[in-house]
Image (cartoon, grey):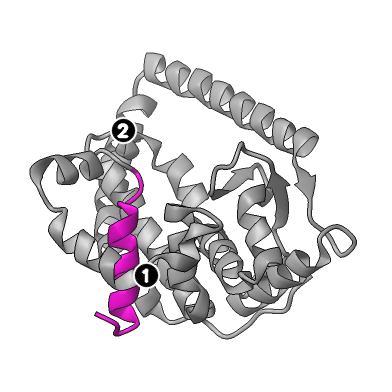
Amino acid sequence: MVASSPVLPRTLVHPRERVYFVLLVLVSVVVYIGLVVSIVGMLWLLVWGVILLHAHGMFWGMIRGNALRISEQQLPEVHAMTVDLAHRMGFRVVPAVYVLQAGGSMNAFAAKFLRSTYVVIFSDVLELAYAQGNDAVAFVLAHELAHIHRKHLVWRALLFPGLLIPFLGAAYQRAAEYTCDRYGAYLVPAGATPGLLALAAGKTLFARIDPAMVVAQAREERGYWVRAAEWWSTHPHLVRRIAAVQEREGKL
């Protein structure tokens, strides 16, 4: 168990997340009302609910059977890092963290199944912690824990009809990513830029990348195709995320 900590600043939540959230609620409520008043709609809702529950359960089982759970005895340094972040974010129970080998991919994600919340961090990201990149790893962990803290996983399930609306669902999820970057930068300021650079350039090259040049790239790469690709994506382009972190750090 983790004791509750002071409330985090509301300014960490990206303004667009709140706007898109309201729109998603309105759309989803209308859809759910339409389904409830229809027998066919209720059956459709029940069938898809069972299918999605089964799919999530299978995925949860795959993680538990193939990933390695971090604990006080297994990668204790990373466990201590997770406990510290969870304490500072006010978690009453520390989410489980697993490490998974993913063919060199630099990524991590948060997930939920029933009452269980957990974070999966790819092994190459964790290798940064053992190559003097502790702050970068802590930022990535803080970002994923922020998804759980903000209940993004719960809302994605409840607001699923709204998420299917072209552009709206993706826009909400991109805003949520910016929010989680803000959480990470607030909790681990020294790891924000290195953490995002590591996701973009890898566990070795990230240390040789000039953040100022990435910010310049974000300003230059603003053509139609670049913007259109982001409109359909659930994640903002990495160069824009790095630029946003640099802006909040006052380095632009």
Residue occupying the point 27% across, 60% down: 240
The foreground one among 241 and 168 is: 241
Identity, as a three-letter code, of the amino acid under mark 2: Leu
3D distance between C-alphas at marks 1 and 2: 23 Å
Residue where numbered disc 1 is placed: 13
Q: Residues within 10 Å of mark 2 (few under 14, many from 20)?
A: few
Q: Position of residue 201 (x, y in %)?
A: 44, 54
Q: Is residue 172 left or right of residue 77?
A: left
The foreground one among 33 and 64 is: 64
Residue 67 belongs to magenta span = no
Say whether residue 149 is visible: no
Q: Is residue 94 left or right of residue 229?
A: right
Element marked by disc 1: loop
Q: In terms of sequence position, does the residue under pointer 1 or pointer 2 come before the other?
A: 1
Element marked by disc 2: loop
The foreground one among 16 and 51 is: 16
Label pair 1/2, CB-CB below 8 angstroms: no
Span shown in magenta: 234-252
Q: Quadrant of residue 89?
A: bottom right
Q: Position of residue 113 (x, y in %)?
A: 64, 41
Say whether residue 98 is visible: yes
Quick one: quadrant of the C terminus? Answer: bottom left
Residue 243 belongs to magenta span = yes
Q: Position of residue 12 (x, y in %)?
A: 39, 75
Residue extending furthest toward the top:
40
Asked if 111 appears above or below 186 in the picture, the reply is above
Q: Position of residue 48 (x, y in %)?
A: 49, 22
Q: Residues within 10 Å of mark 1 (few under 14, many from 20)?
A: many
Residue where numbered disc 2 is placed: 164
Residue occupying the point 77% across, 65% down: 79
Identity, as a three-letter code, of the amino acid under mark 1: Val
